[in-house]
Image (cartoon, rainbow, N blue to C red):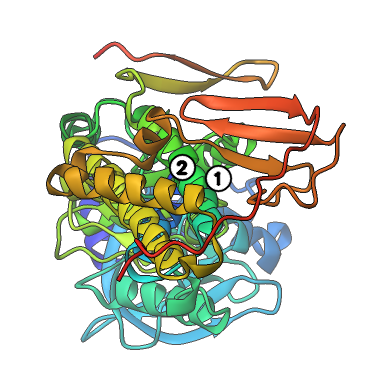
Amino acid sequence: VSEGGRGRAARQPGTPSLFERDPQPAGGSVPVKAARARDSADPGALPGTAISVTTLAAITRDIIEGSFPALWVRGEVVDFKPHRRGHWYFALRDEESLVRCVVWASDQRRMLVAPDDGMAVLARGMLTVYPARSELQLRVVRLEGVGDGLWRKAFEQTRARLERDGLFAAERKRPLPMLPRRVAVITSLDGAALHDVVAVAKRRCPIAEIVVVPAIVQGDDAVGSLCAALDRIARWNEADVVIIGRGGGSREELWAFNDERVVRAVAACAVPTIAAIGHEVDVTLCDLVADCRAATPSAAGERAVPVLDALRERVGRLGESLGTAGQAAVRGAARRLASASRGFTHTAVRLVDDRRARLDAVAGRLTALSPLRTMARGFAVVTDARGGTVSSVSGVSPGDALRVRLQDGVIGVRAERIERDAPAAPAGGGDR
Amino acid sequence: VSFEASLQRLQEIVDALETQELPLARSLELFEEAITHLREATVELARAEATVKVLRERADGVLETLQHDA
C-alpha cells in the first residue's frame, strides 16, 4: 500500500485536504474539492452540516477506488478464511505492513487453487474500502504463487481427486490398436507437435489416416477447447486411437493438461489415448490418465502406428508358415491314414501312397506351397449339408446336397447315384 | 474382426497345424479359416496411402473431414 500511495502522492495532494481546515491550499494547483471544502455551506464544514459515517466511508471508498489502477502486490498470505458462499478472505503482509484481501467467488474461475497461509504470492487487484470498518481491502482478481507452491498444491489436489476415482489405475490402461485406420490428433494446427506426429506416423505407416482435431492448447480458452475436441472425436466415432498433445512450454503453458475437466475427458475417451505433452520431464495429469504416455510428439507418432513394411513382412511370413504347416498336416494325416490302412481298399491306399510320394517330392520346397496346391493337383474335399466331411459313400443317398471344395472355390452338387466299391483284399504296401 | 484379432487367430492356427495331430478334415477347416484371415490382413495392409485431414464441425453440428494443407 505504501508503494502505491507514494507513487500517487503527486497526483493526490487534494484528497486529504477535503476535511482540512487549513486555509492555505497546498501546492500550486488548488484541487476543486479542497477549495469547495472551505465553503461553510459544504457538507462537513460545520457542525450543522456534519456528514454521516456512512457518507464518510462512501467518499473514502470512491476516492480510493478512483485513485489506484489495478496493482500487482507481493506478500505472504496470512489468516486465510474461505467464506461459506465461496469467497476467500485473507491478508497479505510483509515484515512491516498488512492489507486485507478478498477474492470473490466469481473471480476464482481463473485461479488454480486457494492459497495456504504462509505462501508467498503475487496478487493483482483493485484497492477498495470495506465500508463496515472503513478498512482498506484489495479485491484480488489474479493470484500467482512465487515459486511452485501454488502450482504444486493445485496439481496434488486434482491428482488426489482423480486417484480417488481410480483414474490412474493400471488396469484401466487399454492396449493400443496394432494397425489403426484413423489416428485423431488433438493439438494446435500451427504447432510443431503436429508436424512431428505427422512426419513420424506417415514415414512408418503411410496408409494410416491422420485426422487433426484442432484445439487451443494454452491460455484461458485451452480447457474448453480441448474438452470440445474430445467431444467432437466422441461424436465423430471414427478414430481408432487418439493422440493429445503439444510441444514443450512453461508450466503455465502446459497447465490446461492438468485441468480436471480435461483429464476426466481424456479418461472418458472411448478409444485408446496417447498423451504427448511437452518434453520428457513434463508430466501432466493427462499423461498419467492416458492409456499410453509418449515422451514427445514424435514418440507419440511412433507408438500410434506400426512400421508398415515390417508388418507386411510378418503377415507374409505367417502366410508361408501356414502353407508349410498345412502341408505338414496333410502329410501327417496321410501317414496316419496309411498306417491304419488295413481296413482300406487297395484303391484308397494307392491314393494315399500316390499322395505321399508327391508330398515327399515337394518336401524340400514346402514353404512355398499351400495345401491348396494339393487341391490344385485334383484333390477335393466333399462335405455334406451339415458341414461334415464325407469320406465314405455310406451315409450319402441319391438327392443329397454336397459341397465339393476345390482349390479355388466350392461346387454345390447333388448326389445322383451311389456306387459302392467291392471290398478289396487288405493292402500290404502301407506306411510301414 | 480387428486386424490384430485376425493376425492372432492366424498365428494360433499356424501353431495348431504345426504342433497338433489333427484329423485331416479339421486341418482343412482351420486352413480355410486361416486363409480368410490371411486375406483380410493382406487387404488391410494393401490400402492406399492416406492424406492428412482436419476434423471440422459445421455450424449445423455436422462433423466433416477436410484435406489439410500444410
Percent across and percent down for residue A227 are: 53, 45
Say if A52 sits above or below A155 in the image: above
On-image quarter of the C terminus of chain A: bottom left
Which residue lies most toward the front here? A425
Say if A75 sits above or below A244 in the image: below
The answer to which quarter of the image holds residue A252 is: bottom left
Q: Is residue A375 left or right of residue A50?
A: left
Residue B1 - label:
1
Tell me if residue A176 can be seen: no
Q: Is residue A95 left or right of residue B4?
A: left
Percent across and percent down for residue A106 are: 61, 56
Q: How many marks?
A: 2
Residue shown at 30% from the left, 43% from the top = A319
Residue shown at 33% from the left, 43% from the top = A218
Say if A359 sits above or below A257 in the image: above
Q: Is residue A29 left or right of residue A31?
A: left
SS type, badge 1: loop
Percent across and percent down for residue A323 are: 30, 45
Tell me if residue A398 can be seen: yes
Residue type marked 2: His
Q: Nearer the viewer, residue B54 or A59?
A: B54
Q: Nearer the viewer, residue A350 or A323?
A: A350
Residue A48 - label:
none
The answer to whether the residues at label 1 and label 2 have Cβ atoms under 8 Å apart is yes
Residue type marked 1: Val
Residue under circle 2? B37
- How much space separates mark 1 and mark 2, taking CA atoms? 9 Å
The answer to which quarter of the image holds residue A415 is: top right
Q: Nearer the viewer, residue A418 or A83?
A: A418
| Chain under disc 2 | B
On-image quarter of the N terminus of chain A: bottom left
Q: Earlier in the sequence, mark 1 or mark 2?
A: 1
